[in-house]
Image (cartoon, rainbow, N blue to C red):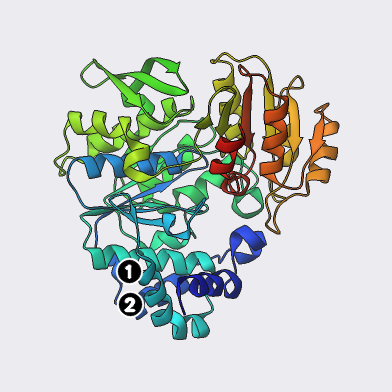
C-alpha cells in the first residue's frame, strides 16, 4: 500500500470516534497494552508529560512542546484529532512523522489489527509511541484523547501529569456531574508522580486531592502559585503579566496564541515547568517559546486569524466552557458586526452552547462532512428557539464566502462549534476570495 491507501485502510477499517462517536471508544486499556507488547513496549522507552482536561489540553501540550524544543531537547508531541493532515498527531520537534513510517508501521501491525481489532485511536496512540521510541526523543508531550482513566494514552508512566480544567463535555461517556468527569480525568494521576491542576473548582478540588492522596502523588493547583496580574490583547494576540507567588516576581509573557483562555492555560504551563527541575530550561527559553508556539509546533485553530479586513477567526471552541471563554474574548476586542459560522456534532450538548450565543450576530449554519455532524438545517431549527437567525449552507467554505459577501472591513467573522468544521476550512480559498 502507498500512503493514501494506508490512510484509507485506517479510516475505513478501524472504529473511528470522529465518524462513529462513543461506539468507537474502547473502555479499557487492554488493546493498547496488547499492541504495545507486540512492539516491545515502546511507551516505556521515552520520558513523557501527560496532559488531560476538558479544554486547553491542546494549547498546553503545544506550549510545553515548544518550550522543550527551544531548550534544545528532541521533543515528541502527540495530539488529537488532526485538522488537515493525519501526521499532525505525531510530531518530533514540530515536524510531522514521515509518510513512509506510517505505511511501514501499518503494514507491520496489520496481523495484530486483524487479531485484536483495535480502534483507530488505539492504533494512532501506539503508532506515536513507536515513533517516539525509534526517534529516541528526550521527552514526549502526550495529550489525552478523551477522559483520562480509560484513554489509550494512559499506559505511559510520565514524569508529570497535567489536568488543565474540568467542564461539561462528553457527558455520555464521562459522567453527568463535574465530580464524575473529574474522576475520569484524574485517572491519569500515577503513583508518586506529581500532578498539576490548571484550574481550581469547588466541585472538583476534593476529587483531585483524594485521588492524589491515594496514589501518594504531590498535587499542585497552578492558581495557588501563579496569578495573572494583567493582560492585553493586540492584533488578536495576547500579552500576559504573571505573578509568581513563591518569590513575588512579576514576569511578562507574549503569546503568539490568541484567545483570552490562554490566561488560564499559561498558569498550568508555568507550574509544570517550575516542577520539572531536572530539565535545563531557562526563563529565556520559556519566553522565546511562548512567542513562537505556532511556528515551533504547528498549532492551528485556537483563535487563529486567517484574514484581515474583515477579520476571520478559526476557533475550535465546541462546548459550553469553550464557547463562554470565546465570548469573553469577544468582549475585549473591537469590531462592528459579528458574523458567526457555526457547525456542531450530534453528541454535544448543543442547546447549552446555543443559549450562550449573542442574538444580535448574523449566523451561517453549516456542518462538517462526517457522520457525527449535526445537520445544518437541524442546527438552524434549534438555534431559532434561542432567537438566533441566519441562513443554512451545506459546506463551511460556502458559508464563509457568504459571510465575506455580507461583512464590512471592520466586521468580525468567527468559525466555531466543531474541530471537524474548522478542519474543513480551505484557508487558501478564503484568502483568494476575500
When the figure is inspected, residue 102 is found, relative to residue 427, above or below; the finding is below
**Does residue 20 appear anywhere in the picture?**
yes
- Near mark 2 (Cα within 10 A), the count class, few <14, some 14-19 or many ≥20, is some
Front position in the image: 93 or 275: 93
Q: Are marks 2 and 1 in contact (CB under 8 Å)?
A: yes
Q: Which residue is labeled 2 in the image?
A: 39
Residue 168 appears at what percent x and percent y? Answer: 61, 40
Residue lying farthest front? 432
Q: Nearer the viewer, residue 282 or 228?
A: 282
Position of residue 18 in the picture relative to residue 388 (left or right): left
Q: Secondary structure beneath disc 2? A: loop
Is 145 left or right of 398, judged from the image as shown? left
- Of label 2 and label 1, which has the lower sequence position? 2
Q: Quadrant of residue 46 in the image?
A: bottom left
Residue at coordinates 51% horizontally, 37% vertically from top-left?
A: 204
Q: Is residue 196 visible?
A: no
Residue 395, given in percent of the width and then of the height, sits at 71, 47
What kind of element bears circle 1?
Answer: helix
Query: Which label was assigned to residue 251?
Result: none
| Location of residue 228 by image quarter | top left
- In the image, taking residue 304 as reference, residue 213 lies left or right, namely left
Q: Is residue 187 left or right of residue 400?
A: left
Quadrant showing the C terminus: top right
Instruction: Report the residue marked by disc 1.
Output: 130
Spatial CA span between label 2 and label 1: 7 Å
For disc 1, the neighbor class at 10 Å (few under 14, some 14 to 19, many from 20) is many
Measured as percent of width and height from the top left, residue 248 is found at 23, 15
In which quadrant of the rendered view does residue 60 lie?
top left
The vertical placement of 10 against 181, above or below, is below
Q: Going 56% across and 46% down the picture, which residue do you hit?
A: 181
Amino acid at each position: 500500500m502507498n500512503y493514501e491507501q494506508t490512510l484509507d485502510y485506517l479510516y475505513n477499517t478501524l472504529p473511528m470516534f470522529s465518524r462513529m462517536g462513543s461506539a468507537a471508544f474502547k473502555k479499557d486499556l487492554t488493546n493498547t497494552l496488547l499492541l504495545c507488547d507486540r512492539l516491545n513496549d515502546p511507551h516505556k522507552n521515552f520520558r513523557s508529560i501527560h496532559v488531560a482536561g476538558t479544554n486547553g489540553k491542546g494549547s498546553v501540550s503545544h506550549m510545553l512542546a515548544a518550550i522543550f524544543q527551544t531548550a534544545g531537547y528532541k521533543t515528541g508531541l502527540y495530539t488529537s484529532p488532526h485538522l488537515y493532515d493525519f501526521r499532525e498527531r505525531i510530531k518530533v520537534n514540530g515536524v510531522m512523522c514521515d509518510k513512509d513510517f506510517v505505511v511501514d508501521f501499518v503494514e507491520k501491525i496489520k496481523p495484530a489489527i486483524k487479531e485484536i481489532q483495535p480502534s483507530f485511536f488505539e492504533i494512532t496512540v501506539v503508532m506515536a509511541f513507536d515513533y517516539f521510541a525509534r526517534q529516541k526523543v528526550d521527552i514526549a508531550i502526550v495529550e489525552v484523547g478523551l477522559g483520562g482513566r480509560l484513554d489509550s494514552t494512559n499506559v505511559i508512566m510520565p514524569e508529570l501529569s497535567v489536568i488543565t480544567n474540568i467542564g461539561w463535555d462528553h457527558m455520555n461517556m464521562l459522567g453527568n456531574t463535574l465530580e464524575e468527569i473529574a474522576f475520569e480525568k484524574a485517572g491519569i494521576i500515577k503513583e508518586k508522580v506529581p500532578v498539576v491542576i490548571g484550574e481550581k473548582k469547588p466541585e472538583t478540588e476534593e476529587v483531585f486531592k483524594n485521588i492524589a492522596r491515594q496514589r501518594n502523588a504531590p498535587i499542585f493547583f497552578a492558581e495557588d502559585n501563579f496569578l495573572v496580574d494583567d493582560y492585553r490583547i493586540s492584533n488578536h494576540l495576547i500579552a500576559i503579566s504573571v505573578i509568581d507567588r513563591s518569590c513575588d516576581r512579576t514576569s511578562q509573557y507574549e503569546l503568539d496564541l490568541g484567545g483570552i483562555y490562554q490566561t488560564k492555560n499559561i498558569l498550568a504551563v508555568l507550574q509544570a515547568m517550575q516542577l520539572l527541575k531536572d530539565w535545563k530550561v531557562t526563563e529565556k527559553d520559556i519566553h522565546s517559546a511562548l512567542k513562537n508556539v505556532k511556528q515551533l509546533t504547528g498549532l492551528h485553530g485556537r483563535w487563529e486569524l486567517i484574514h484581515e479586513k474583515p477579520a476571520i477567526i478559526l476557533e475550535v471552541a465546541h462546548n459550553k466552557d469553550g464557547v463562554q471563554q470565546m465570548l469573553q474574548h469577544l468582549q475585549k476586542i473591537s469590531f462592528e458586526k459579528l458574523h458567526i459560522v457555526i457547525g456542531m456534532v450530534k453528541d454535544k450538548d448543543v442547546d447549552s452552547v446555543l443559549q450562550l450565543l449573542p442574538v444580535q450576530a448574523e449566523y451561517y449554519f453549516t456542518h462538517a462532512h462526517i457522520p457525527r455532524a449535526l445537520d445544518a438545517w437541524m442546527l438552524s431549527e434549534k438555534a431559532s428557539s434561542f432567537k438566533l437567525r441566519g441562513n443554512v449552507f451545506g459546506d463551511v467554505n460556502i458559508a464563509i464566502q457568504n459571510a465575506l459577501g455580507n461583512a464590512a472591513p471592520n466586521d468580525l467573522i468567527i468559525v466555531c462549534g466543531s474541530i471537524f468544521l474548522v478542519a474543513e476550512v480551505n484557508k487558501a480559498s478564503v484568502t483568494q476570495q476575500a
